[in-house]
Image (cartoon, rainbow, N blue to C red):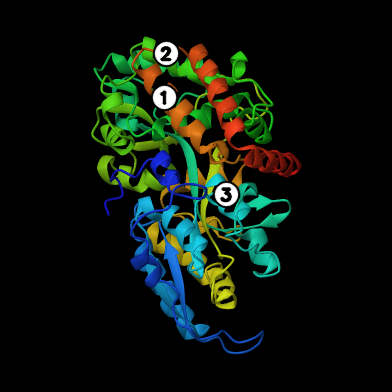
Amino acid sequence: MDPLARPLSRRQLLRYGAGGLALTGLGPLLAACGGSDSETAADGGTLTGEMDLWWWGEQEAVGLKKWVEETNAKFKAEVGPSVKSNLLDTGQVISQFANAAAAGKPPDVQFLWNGIYHMENAWLGYLEPLDGVVSDDVLKRSGATALSTFEGKQYRVGWYAIGMGMAYNKNLFEKAGLDADSPPETWDELLAAGEKLKGIDVSPIGGGVKDGYLGEWWLGQGLTQNLDSPADAIKLFIGELDWREPKYHEHWTRLEELHKAGFINDDINSLELYQGIQLMDTNKLAITTSVSTLLPASQKALGEDGVGFMVMPVFGKGELAGKPLLDSQGFGIPKKAKHKEAAARWLEFIHSEERVNALYETVEQVPTNESFDPDSITNPLIKSFHERWIAGEHLPYVPNLMPTLFWSDAMFVASQKILNGTMTGEQAGELAVEITDKWKKRNPDLVENYAKWSDDLADA
């Protein structure tokens, strides 16, 4: 699949996921899973059989398939079990696993996005806590982030890192008379840069919001600026804090400001996220929300020195303002996996020094493993990403805490309407309160778990 192909929207992904409707046509998927019926040996014995791996990632980081194939071959040679690998489509990551787990026929290792994407499955009892199953050393250094833990139990190991930020076209910056090596750090500097960029007849900032992801990324980077703790995000989503308070909808007010200033590309509502990013890659757009995993592709389009990556310029006054957001992809073990011992050894195996280093060498993606040696990074842009987003202080990606109804009926609606001029930031705050109240009434059990999760994050 093309890494810039349109992913299924989160509302579609979760509609059929945990707590949602069952998919039709599940039989062939379940029949294909399960691997060999052979049992793995007890501790210290030789592992046998064939374990099932369901994974995702080639769509955003081309080359991962080669790494996975090499890893599985080495695992069989060095540990014993063979691995049956199933590369999931974007639309299957949540739905296929949730339905297979509900039917009692999950794979042995499952790819898991972070936060609520996997935590609802943990709450439903579909995921095995990894404490005491995977070595403490691997759990500690795998880079799973605090969003993979609930009530002291960890449900994922990390795999590769995803930095959330804003990519910019350095060639357009230079053409506009801006210092491409010193991007805007404050909101006023961003506005000043926008005026200069308008002068060279390009859209200063924007992308594509048709599928909703730009709105999610904007909320993640903007809302965080007025929070004092990631736990504050959960308190907003469960109604303990009020979206109508100006600081909690300021990110939407700032988006409205950019629209009114004429800085946003006119076709933003008709383009999907990756179509918008391609505007930057084709010199039609100067700045766009993006992620570190896409930087190598942008460099291929604009040249190694043609792309920059920055933290969203600061407007907020919260304790988290100006700090980069870092997320991670990862893996877990289903509760009803047939080969849990083999699965645990596979999770440990991918965090061996050789496999960690091979992840960067093969795919040019930065491993989340804390023991990865950044001196092996040769790409200057990726090196600077590592220094700022990973080696320095960073924050978890708070949209990973967002309830599905809020995503579809508040964030998604607000971002589109603000960018077509039919909603203000203040009105978006009102909508957010309305949807929060509706979600709470529908999901009292989830509200309780969210409150516990908030306490976990506050203590992290």
In-front residue for pair 433/141 = 433
Label 3 residue SS = helix
Disc 2 to disc 1: CB gap under 8 Å: yes
Q: Quadrant of residue 181?
A: top left
Q: Mark 1 points at which residue?
A: 413
Q: Where is residue 224 in the image (x, y as percent from the top left)?
A: 58, 29
Q: Residue at coordinates 74% horizontally, 40% vertically from top-left?
A: 455
Q: Where is residue 157 in the image (x, y as percent from the top left)?
A: 58, 60
Q: Name the residue under label 2.
A: 423
- Residue 393 visible, this angle: no
Disc 3 to disc 1: CB gap under 8 Å: no
Whichever of callouts 2 and 1 sits on the residue coming sooner in the sequence is: 1
Real-space Cα distance between discs 2 and 1? 9 Å
The type of residue carrying mark 3 is Glu
Whether residue 432 is situated above or below residue 13 in the rendered picture: above
Whether residue 207 is situated above or below residue 143 in the rendered picture: above
| Image disc number at residue 376 | none
Q: Position of residue 268 (x, y in %)?
A: 30, 25
The type of residue carrying mark 1 is Val
| Image disc number at residue 120 | 3
Q: How crowded is mark 3: few (under 14 residues within 10 Å), some or many (20 or more)?
A: some
Q: Residue at coordinates 61% horizontally, 31% vertically from top-left?
A: 441
In-front residue for pair 142/94 = 94
Whichever of callouts 3 and 1 sits on the residue coming sooner in the sequence is: 3
Disc 2 to disc 3: CB gap under 8 Å: no
Left or right of residue 202, residue 247 in this image: right
Whichever of callouts 2 and 3 sits on the residue coming sooner in the sequence is: 3
User: In the picture, which quadrant includes the N terminus?
Assistant: bottom left
Label 1 residue SS = helix
